[in-house]
Image: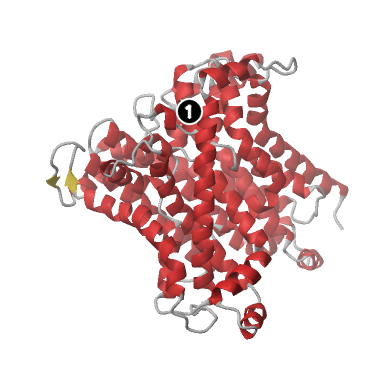
Amino acid sequence: MTSRAERLTTYTVLSLFAVVAVFPLLAVVSQALDLPHLSFGAFSEAWRRGHFARYLTNSLIVVTVVVVVASVLSILAGYALGTMEFRGGSLLFYVFLAGLMVPTEAVVIPLYFDLRSVGLDNTLPGLMLPQIAQSVSFGVFWMRAYFRSAPRSLIEAARIDGASSWTTMRRVLIPVGRPAILTMVVLISMWTWNEFLLALVIINSNESRRTAPLGLSIFQGQHQTQYPLLMAGALIVATPVVLVYVFLQRHFIAGMLSGAVKE
Amino acid sequence: MNVRPPGEPRRIGYLYVLPAFVVYALFLLWPLLHGAWLSLFHWDGLTVGTWAGAANYSQAVSDPQLRGAFGHAVVLLFFYAILPCVIAFVLVSAMARTRPRGLTFFRTVLFLPQVVAMVAVAVAWQWIYSEHGPINGTLRLAGLGGLARGWLGDFDWALPSVGLIGTWVEIGLAMVLFLAGVQKIPRELYEAARVDGAGAFREFFAVTLPGLRRELAIALTLTTVAALRNFDLIYLTTSGGPGNATKVPAYEVYNRTFNTGEVGLACAIGIIIAVIIFAFTAVINRVVEGRP
């Protein structure tokens, strides 16, 4: 049994920290929309002056391509590394795993020169490819863990029925693995949407290719202390991820906290 | 550790891994190696570089400005990792024996700062720390108007101010981790401790701390890595200023490439950050898992 006092302390502490966590975010919403009057003046001005329609479209394109390509590649590789045995398989896995620990700061400068030398700087593909590579590192780690944990009996039953390795994956394991795949998809979406350093360095001169976070940072530079405008911009950039998070928070939390777990 | 994957030998496995490996090798492994190679040259990014050997690395540890940057990283490590983990740990331990309802709601809210784009976080906090922001407002209201200042532009206060943004981002992550862990500790252990006459203090060391070892390792790893990979926040709030007051290694990678034309040095700093992250992750996991 726990005493009333203990329960009260618990709720007080939790509430206090919940308030601290949301206060800056509520400040953004309330200033952007001029609450409690509710006016969309700052919002529409920021939308127009910050070119957010275009930047959000760019972000959406980048996220869609990165998520689709990285997920497919990760599922394929995770399937092989999790269910098949071949020479060098575990070495390959550790090579992918090491990528989880490589900070963007260590690769962004060489990437800048490499992409420039092949004409991919200031292009969306140039921004997508490094993010697909980073996402694959997490995706392989994540999908391999799922495929390893899938019941062996499922795989063996499919094999006895004469299914090829492809059919086993496609018809048996992927349908059962939807929750794991969804977690991977939401995490890669969030990381890609929020990515700033790569966008800043790779999209350094082509205004029409800026992503939403990069666009906001430029907008911030132009409107230093006009907080309602800046807050409106922040709201525009942050809202898509926050909306998805509200509905799928379990997936976000489970995935992000697993990133550091070693076997 | 079970290294062998289950399943029979199948050569076709290579075919499944190939596409992922090609992209990964070209756009992550290659840039990493290329960065290590570039770090061995004096190069301004335009003209022909000259061989430097380890000179960039020795400059990274001897140059007073760069030493300062690494020193700032240590300070931020306190704000990003130590402070959130200690506060969250103590608080969650204090509520270890209760099983509060509505935990899903609190978890969702506490974790929220982790999913908001850093650009938006930076905008919100710039307002909070600004001349007419809520912190100065509260100080003036309390009759302490003399203490009011533009926090991010103050030579002494800029670094701790940025650090506290890191604390704000990471504390929810630590709390969510520990809350999940503490729910898994069998209640009987606490009851047994009570029967044995253990006070809150002994209960903490005998039951809660050992029960949360794993979560502590994860929290320390994630927050430490966040403290070292904090380019976004620094660039967006202070750009390393005022003066050099908030320059950190992650920012210097960008600064030395695009502002001072020391590409080799910038790459060396990037490699050093990567090595520190590898080392930290390995050490934290070893210590907590009790291996030598």
Q: Is residue A52 left or right of residue A111?
A: right
Residue B66, visible in the rendered structure? yes
Query: Going 45% across and 30% down the picture, which residue do you hit?
Result: B236
- Residue located beneath label 1 in the image: A215
Residue B157, visible in the rendered structure? no
Relative to B118, say whether B33 is above or below.
below
Query: Going 13% across and 41% down the picture, which residue do you hit?
Result: B48
Question: In terms of image quadrants, where is residue A149?
Answer: bottom right
In the structure shown, which secondary structural element does the residue marked by tag 1 occupy? helix
Q: Nearer the viewer, residue B62 or B258?
A: B258
Question: In terms of image quadrants, where is residue B155?
Answer: top left
Crowd around label 1: few <14 · some 14–19 · many ≥20 (10 Å): many
Query: Going 45% across and 36% down the picture, which residue do you hit?
Result: B232
Return the x and y of residue B284 as percentages of the image width and height.
Answer: 48, 60
Q: Is residue A256 left or right of residue B66?
A: right
Which quadrant is home to the N terminus of chain A? bottom right
Q: Nearer the viewer, residue B91 or B39?
A: B39
User: Mark 1 is on which residue type?
Assistant: Gly
Q: Is residue A252 left or right of residue A51?
A: right
Relative to B130, say whether B160 is above or below.
below
Q: Is residue A10 left or right of residue B9?
A: right
Question: In terms of image quadrants, where is residue B206?
Answer: bottom right
Return the x and y of residue B269 as percentages of the image width and height.
Answer: 30, 45
Q: Chain of mark 1?
A: A
Question: How are the colours assigned in the image?
Answer: secondary structure
